[in-house]
């Protein structure tokens, strides 16, 4: 297991940072579906979400929204590709299944790269 994790780390081109509470991923520009961001890098992010329709999307637009006591930032939108998506806990009669998704950002503009860097500086744990 340790060997496998070492191999995965070597494949990553960007360091991942743990997201602060209040950082959310939003599926698409006008979606009401969102998930808690776990970690983020200049190349992608991981997030958890409640699965209400049992589907995984390969290529889609994803937004990142930050909300905390001091400010609510505008949503930053990126094109993303699903790298991994798996169930963390099964649903019950009262709760939807919880899933975790890992996405890679695709075709970032210079402006998006700058916004992403600012987000990483201001909204991740050091």
Image: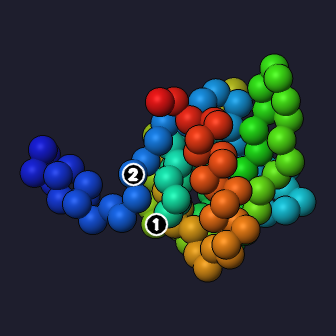
Q: Position of residue 94 (x, y in %)?
A: 69, 27
Q: Is residue 117 above or below residue 97?
A: below
Seen in the image, is 106 located left or right of residue 111? left
Residue 15 is labelled as: 2
Seen in the image, is 18 located left or right of residue 13? right
Tell me the CA gap for discs 2 and 1. Answer: 16 Å
Q: Where is residue 41 in the image (x, y as percent from the top left)?
A: 50, 53
Residue 83 is labelled as: 1
Element carrying mark 1:
strand
Residue 7 in sight from this viewpoint: yes
**Residue under the point 75% across and 38% down:** 66
In the rendered image, which quarter is residue 2 located in? top left
Residue farthest to the bottom, as pictured: 107
**Residue under the point 58% across and 45% down:** 120
Residue 96 is labelled as: none
In the rendered image, which quarter is residue 107 located in? bottom right
Residue 48 in sight from this viewpoint: no
Q: Position of residue 20 (x, y in %)?
A: 60, 30
**Residue under the point 49% across and 36% down:** 18
Residue farthest to the top, as pictured: 69
Residue farthest to the right, as pictured: 30
């Amino acid at each position: 297991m340790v060997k496998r994790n070492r191999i995965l780390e070597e494949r990553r081109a960007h360091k991942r940072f743990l997201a602060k509470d209040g950082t959310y991923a939003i599926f698409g520009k006008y979606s009401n579906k969102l998930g808690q961001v776990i970690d983020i890098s200049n190349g992608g992010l991981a997030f958890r979400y409640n699965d209400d329709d049992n589907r995984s999307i390969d290529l889609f637009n994803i937004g990142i929204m930050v909300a905390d006591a001091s400010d609510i930032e505008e949503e930053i939108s990126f094109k993303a590709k699903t790298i991994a998506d798996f169930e963390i806990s099964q649903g019950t009669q009262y709760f939807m299944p919880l899933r975790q998704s890992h996405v890679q950002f695709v075709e970032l503009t210079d402006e998006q790269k700058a916004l992403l860097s600012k987000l990483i500086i201001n909204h991740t744990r050091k």
